[in-house]
Image (cartoon, helix red, strand yellow):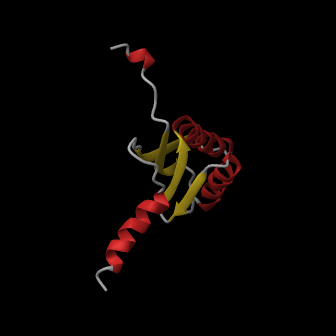
Amino acid sequence: MDYASIETPAACYADFCLIPVGTGKISVAEEVAEVQRVLKASGLKYTMHSAGTTVEGAWDEVMTVIGKAHTVVHHRGVLRVQSSMRVGSRTDKKQTAEDKVKRVNDILAGDE
């Protein structure tokens, strides 16, 4: 197999939690707000939640916007940034993060 010619998946979703390290502050809300501005400017679909953000789109675009999120936090003077990330892709159908949540909620609605 020619490993150099392997393509990335066409689309993905990434749930990531960016962690500014060494800010000297308890709160990182200002850094999180800056990351949200980057995501908004990207045009990609994203959903912020209490422990991170889910972003959806083309693989390369998702990975690029996460890299840009690191860069804007570095530009705020943070010398070290860590991200915890889970990435999913599928080839059998298109499914958004919203679709996934709705599917489980539909199942739970049957419990009532």
Name the image quarter holding the N terminus: top left
Q: Residue extending furthest front? A: 92
Tell me the residue at 64%/50% (across/down): 39
Up the image or down, 38 lies above or below 61; here it is: below
Q: Residue extending furthest right? A: 41
State whether residue 58 appears in this view.
Answer: yes
Name the image quarter holding the C terminus: bottom left
Tell me the residue at 51%/64% (across/down): 49
Residue 41, percent from left and from top? 71, 49
Q: Is residue 93 left or right of residue 77?
A: left
**Closest to the observer: 4 or 92?**
92
Residue 98, percent from left and from top? 49, 62
State whether residue 25 appears in this view.
Answer: no
Residue 71, percent from left and from top? 63, 39
**Closest to the observer: 99 or 52?**
99
Quarter location, residue 89: top left
Residue 2, percent from left and from top? 37, 13
